[in-house]
Amino acid sequence: MSTIKALAIASEMFPFVKTGGLADVVGALPQALANEGVETVTLIPGYPSVVHAHDTAAQVHTFNNLFGGPARLLGTRGAGTAVLVLDAPHLYGRPGNPYLGPDGKDWPDNAQRFAALAWVAAQIADGAVSGHAPDLLHAHDWQAGLAPAFVRFSGSRRIGTVVTVHNLAFQGVFPRTLLQPLGLPPEAFTLDGVEYYGMIGFLKAGLALADRITTVSPTYAAEIRTPEGGMGLDGLLRARAHALHGILNGIDEAVWNPATDPMIAMRYSDALLPHRAANKSIVQERFGLVASPTTLLFGIIGRLTTQKGPDLVLDALEALLGLGAQLAVLGSGDSDLERRFAAAAARHAGRVGCVIGYDEGLAHQMQAGIDALLVPSRFEPGGLTQLCALRYGALPVVARVGGLADTLIDANEAALAAGTGTGIQFTPPSSEMLQIALERTAQLWRQPALWRRLQHNAMRCDVSWRRPAAHYAALYRELLAERAA
């Protein structure tokens, strides 16, 4: 089996820069692909934290004028894989969030910042950087969405292109007046190119021009082909259904492993599940909750946005507390939701705890200590937090959408009889149906032997990258064989 050389392009990559699950995927997938005969080089922007982490990296290429200033490519290794860092201080040398300025709004030059990333990827694909010519290009989300367009309209070396949609809600849409400043020729501005309702659509360009489209779960791949889930792109995705593939995410089992995790108070495994109890007491203490090993402890970990459905939890909070349960919340996002959770914690001291912000170590400790994880998303392309919960024996309580529908088995009567349940699902995503799911969870909790069996089922799930990596490698080989024919 011949080795495939892939160039991945993304705006973030764990452990160097992370705002969400995209970074985790981009950081972990190349290592898994290596076992499938795929060598990946990942191109990422040179934000200050990234450049600092690679301050000894070798310079492999320079650009005299990249969208308004000089830039250089730094070649190094990180997170167990090859990395190319685009060091362009005029574009990326800014502290804080990679996408937002100090005012909390998008940087006004985000179009140029991420068009530059995509243009450099196309240059590498075209063989401009010695020793780095790939067999195919794999772009992640809208920030890399123009890469297939630059390959199509600017490159002389036509290679296979793949675009992965991690969340269709974020599309990167900019004025058509930027067409020439972004280096796109007039012929690119067509319905089959970068044009999107009279604007330039970065993600739309990738969806229209890439040879293959993937998204992060089979159910989400179906949902985005409907008017309800397609975010204005459902017609295009239906037309390109033959090129669209839903491939589940995995998690890095070296990072997320309760038996070896240095971020949790007490390590444990499926065979040593009683040791998990010590972590629950730590979480209760950290969130100011009454110490009680017998009280059902729910947790929320992640972004506080309407997509994720935390408002449904707030609407169902009295029902949750009426079950005698507790709630710990770690997250940030919408200021109104942050305020409402803080108010709930003050109003229900000892029963509801809230930490606004994100803390990687605390996220690990929560997965190891909460009894059940709440993910009542209105839509969820893939989801990683529920995979971590399965790995750590925190039973996920999720809306039956997207990747949440594909990654766990509802503990209904049939599943319990077959011994196969791994969590609780509900539909539709509403506070009323969430309340019923909370009641079902509490009923299971009151049966300790059954709860432990569900925990064992969850912890034995394969949430690794092994199967997803095999799917990606097969897709790569199919694409390359098609282009060679």
Image: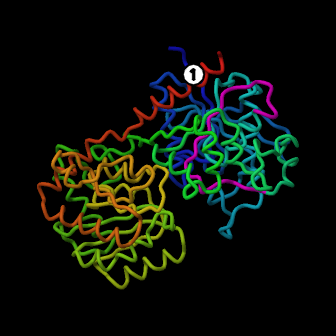
Q: Which residue is at a point 55% across and 22% down the rendered structure image?
A: 477
Q: Quadrant of residue 177?
A: bottom right
Q: Say above or below: 80 vs 91.
A: above
Task: Answer left or right for 342 relative to 10.
Answer: left
Amino acid type at image mark 1: Ile
Q: Which residue is at a point 19% across and 54% down the rendered structure image?
A: 413
User: Along the line of sight, which residue is nearer the eye, 205 or 119?
Assistant: 205
Q: Which residue is at a point 49% across and 49% down the rendered structure image?
A: 220
Task: Answer left or right for 160 relative to 196.
Answer: left
The answer to if 153 sits in the magenta stretch is yes
> What stretch of residues is rendered in magenta?
152-174
- Is any part of residue 10 visible from this angle? yes
Task: Answer left or right for 422 relative to 427.
Answer: left
Q: Say above or below: 217 vs 478.
A: below
Q: Quadrant of residue 54?
A: top right
Task: Answer left or right for 114 relative to 383.
Answer: right
Q: Quadrant of residue 326?
A: bottom left
Categorize mark 1 by other alpha carbons within 10 Å: few (<14), some (14-19), many (20+).
many
Residue beneath disc 1 = 4
The answer to if 278 sits in the magenta stretch is no
User: Along the line of sight, which residue is nearer the eye, 312 or 436?
Assistant: 436
